[in-house]
Amino acid sequence: MPARFEQLRPLFYPRAVAVLGASRHPLKFGFQYLRALQDFGFAGRLYPVNPDLKEVLGLKAYPSVAALPETPDLATVSVPAPAVPAALRECLARGIPGAQVLSAGFREAGPEGERLEAELRDIARQGIRIIGPNCFGVYSPAAGITLMPGSEFSPAAGGVGFFSQSGGGSCDLAYMARGRGLNFSVLVSYGNGCDLEAVDLLDYFREDPATRVVGAYLEGVRDGRAFLAALRRCAEKKPVVIYKGGLTETGRAGALSHTGSLAGEAAAWKAALKQAGAIAAESLPDLVECLMACVCLGEFTGSGLGILAGGGARNVEALDAAGHAGFGVPEVSSETRAAIAARIPPAGGRAGNPTDLANPVMAPSVIGPLMEALAGEPAVDALMLYQAVFYMQKEVRRYRSATPSAPALKLDYHLELAAVAERILKERGKPLLMILPDIASDPAHAEMEEARRAARMHYTSRGIPCFDHAEAALLVLKRLRARNLRVRGLS
Amino acid sequence: MPARFEQLRPLFYPRAVAVLGASRHPLKFGFQYLRALQDFGFAGRLYPVNPDLKEVLGLKAYPSVAALPETPDLATVSVPAPAVPAALRECLARGIPGAQVLSAGFREAGPEGERLEAELRDIARQGIRIIGPNCFGVYSPAAGITLMPGSEFSPAAGGVGFFSQSGGGSCDLAYMARGRGLNFSVLVSYGNGCDLEAVDLLDYFREDPATRVVGAYLEGVRDGRAFLAALRRCAEKKPVVIYKGGLTETGRAGALSHTGSLAGEAAAWKAALKQAGAIAAESLPDLVECLMACVCLGEFTGSGLGILAGGGARNVEALDAAGHAGFGVPEVSSETRAAIAARIPPAGGRAGNPTDLANPVMAPSVIGPLMEALAGEPAVDALMLYQAVFYMQKEVRRYRSATPSAPALKLDYHLELAAVAERILKERGKPLLMILPDIASDPAHAEMEEARRAARMHYTSRGIPCFDHAEAALLVLKRLRARNLRVRGLS
C-alpha cells in the first residue's frame, strides 16, 4: 500500500481519540463532540483534555496531551482559534499522527486568521496531518466515530468514500443518503483544508478497498494541476462524483467567504472535471442520486429503455425524459407486444414500449411478467418502472380502516417486485430504475409519504435505484453511462 | 358575460348530475363515480341511470334519461364505448347542456374508436357540450363535484383554474397541489377533447372571476392557431402555466397513443408558448411550483435577492442558483452589514448578502431583524431564506423525549417568521421565498419530514412560496418575472 494510504488510515480508524478543548458547557464544540461519540457508540478510548476539569460526561479528563496514558491515533481540537497552534504542537510532541481542528476563525475570517492558518500548515509539515480548520472532521462508521452533529448518522459502513469542504453540507448529504441505500466507508469534512485536502483524499479513496464509489463537495482546490491528476488517477479506478459549488460569479464570492477558496472559472472547471473522468453533480440532492446510481448501476453502458407506467401522462413524461437525456425506447417485437397485451386492461392500457398499465397500481403478478417480456427484447438495456406508492397506500388506508391490524406498508408487494428485478439483473444483466413520484404533499397524507420512503429504502438497499422523476433518473443515468464509456475507451 | 362562459358554467357548477352506466360493481366507473361524489359530499341531486337497477348506493335509479324527474345540468357517461353515442343522444334529447364521457376506447384505440369519436363530435354540434371521451371529467369544489378517483381532493375552492388531457396527471397534480397552498376554482380532465378542449377552457378561465391563475397539461391541440390566439387572450389577463408533454420524438409517440394527439414540433411549441405570454413548465412538479409562484408572488418583476442561510454550502448553493437564473445578490451598505453582524455568531457567521447564520436553526427573534435589515436595502427586491426544518425537528424530538406533551411541530416558530414576512411584504412590497430542503430521507426520520410538510403548508397558505432547492425556486421565479415584464411591455 502506498505511504499516504497507510499514513491516513489511523486517523480514519482510530482506537483512541483525544479531545482538546473538552467542555462541560452543552453549547461548546468540546462538549458536543464528546457527546456525539458517546451517543454514536465509539468503542475505543476517549480522552478529554482540559486542565480545568477532572471529569466530563463521565470520562476522566487529563490536564494535557502529555499526561495521557497512551498516544491517541487522532486528536480533535476545539479550542479558540488563537490557542489552536499551541494545542497542535502538544499533539505533535506526543507523536499523534493526525488532528482535526473544528474551530473556526482562520483563513475564512480575514488577515489575522490567514496568519494563524499558515502557522497550522507549518506545524503539519513537521509531522502531523491536520484536517480542517473550520470543519466537522471524520465520520467513519466502522471505527465508531462521527461528526460533531452526526450522532444520528447511519452506524452501517458501506462503499461510498466522501469528502467535503462544508460541514453543514456533509451533514445534509449523510442524512439525505441514509434513506437511499448509501452507506459510507469514510466521510471527511475538511473545511479550509490547510493541510489534508482533495488530493490526499482522492489518493486515499483510490487505494481504499472498502471504497467503491467516491463523492465530493468542493469549493476550490489548492493546486488545480495536482488535483486534476489525482482525480484522473482515482476516476480510472472508481466512479467519482463531484459537486463543485461556486461556479457562478455570485457563487464564487460565497465560496471565498465560506472556506476561503478561490473557486476558479465555471466553464474551465466543468470541462476539467469531465476530462478527468469524473461525474459532475449539479446540487447536493443530485450528488446523492449520482452516488446512488454509481452504487446500484455500476458499469452500465446501455442506451435502450423498456418503460412501464400506469397512466398516459406518466408515459409521455418518461418518453420526454428519455428523448431529452438521449436514451432510446425501442419498438418491441409483435410477440412481445402480444404477450404484454394479454396481461393488461384493453381500455386505457397500451402494450408495447412504453407499456401503459392503465392503472397506477398493479399487482406484481401482472407487472413481473411484463418486466420479463420487455427485458427479453435485445434492444432493451434497462427497465424503468413508474410506481405511484401514494395511490397504493390510499387503498391500504381504506383496507386498514376495516382491518386495523393490517400492516401499514404493503412490504410483500415491494419485495416481490424487487425479487423480479434481481432475477432479471442476474440473468440478463439489465437493471431496473424505479420512479416513485412524490404526490402526497399534504401533511394529512404523511403516512403515504412515509410508505414511499420505506419502499425506496427497501429497493435501494437491494441495489434498485429510486428517483422522484423520470427526468432526474435519466439525467443521472446519462452521466454515469458517459463516464463508463470513457473509462472503457468507448467514447 | 360572453356566451361561452355562460354556456359552460352549469357544467362546472351543476345542481343535478345524471350518471349513465351507474353500476353496483365496485370496479366499474359507474359505481366509483357515484361513490366519489357521495364521499366528496355533493349536496345536489344525483341520478343513477340504468334500466337494470332500482337502486344503487342508496340512490333511486332511473331506467332512462327521459324518466328523470328533472333535467340535470351535467351527465356523466361511463357505458362501454359503442354505447356512448346512444347515451349522448338521450342526453341531447332531454336538453342536458353538457356531458362528460369517462369511457375509453375512442380515437386513442384505433380506426373504429376514431369513427365513434367522430360520431360524438357530430352529436356535440347538435347542441350539447361534451367533455372527453377517455377522461376523468370535472372537479369543482365549490359545486361539490370531483373526479372519479378524486374523493380525497381538497374540499376548499381557490383561484387556480386547471385543465388537462390526462386524468392520472390531473389526480397527481391535485394531490401535489394540496400541500402547497393551491386550491382550485375548476379542474377539467378532458382526455381526447372531441368537443370541449383547450380553446374553450382558456376562454372560460379568462372570464371566470374565481380564477386568478390558469394551468394546463397538454399533449396536443386541435387547431394550433386558435389555441395560440386563445392563449394570448387569456395570458394577457392572468398568468397561464403550461406543461406540454410529448416535446421529444419519443414523447410524441407516447402522446399519440395516449390521447391521440399530434404533439407538434418541440422548438415551435416552446417558442409559441413564450410568445403568447405563457409560462412553460418542464414537468408536473415544476408546473405545481410555477402555479404556486403565480399565486404567491403575483406581479413580481424584481431582480435583486437578499439571501439568508445557515451554513456556507447552503449560501454557495443559493448564490450559484442566483447566478444561474440571472438574479443579482447586491452588496449591502456598511450600516446594514453592521446591524446584521451584531446579531449573528462571529465564528462561522458572515454578515452581508448573503448572510451566513452559521447555524441551520436560528430563532425568529434573530432571523426577523435580519430579514428586515436586508429588505431595507433598496436593491433587494425579494428575500430568500433557507430553513432546515430537519435539524429543528431533531431538537424538537430530543426535547420531546423529556417532555412528551410538547407539540411535535414548532408551529409558533413558523407563524412568527411568517408574520415577519407578511409585514415586510405589506410595508415594502418585497416577498419571501422559503427554501425547505428535503433532508430526512430515512423512514426513521418520517416525523421530521412530516413537520417539514406541515411547515410548508403553513407558509404557502399564507402566501409564502416554499421550494426544496434554491435552484428550483429561482428558475421558477425567473419565468414568472419574464412573464410579468412581457405583460407590462417591459421586455
Image (cartoon, coloured by chain):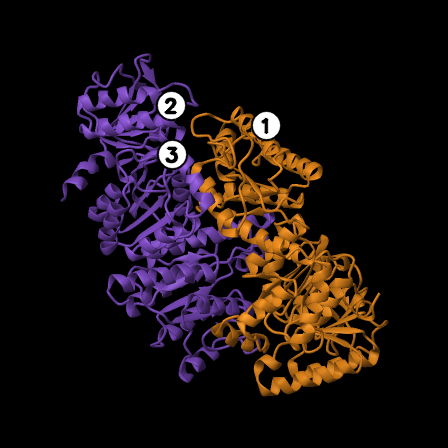
Chain colours: A purple, B orange
* Image location (x, y in percent) of residue B246: 53, 71
Q: Residue at position x 33%, y 13% from top?
A: A53
- Callout 2 secondary element: helix
Q: Which mark is residue A151?
A: 3
- Amino acid at circle 1: Ser
* Cα distance in 3D space between marks 2 and 1: 26 Å
Identify the subunit bearing mark 2: A
In the picture, measured across the screen, residue B325 lies left or right of residue B113, that is left
Which residue type carries mark 2?
Phe
- Mark identifier at residue A154: none
> Horizontally, is B207 left or right of B163 in the view?
right
The image shows residue A51 at horizontal and vertical percentages of 30, 13
Residue B87's image quarter?
A: bottom right
- Can the viewer see residue A367 in this picture? yes
Residue bearing the label numbered 1: B365
- Does B445 sit above or below residue A122? below
Above or below, A295 against A36 in this view is below
A242 lies left or right of B247: left
Q: Are marks 2 and 1 on the same chain?
A: no
Say which residue label 2 marks.
A31
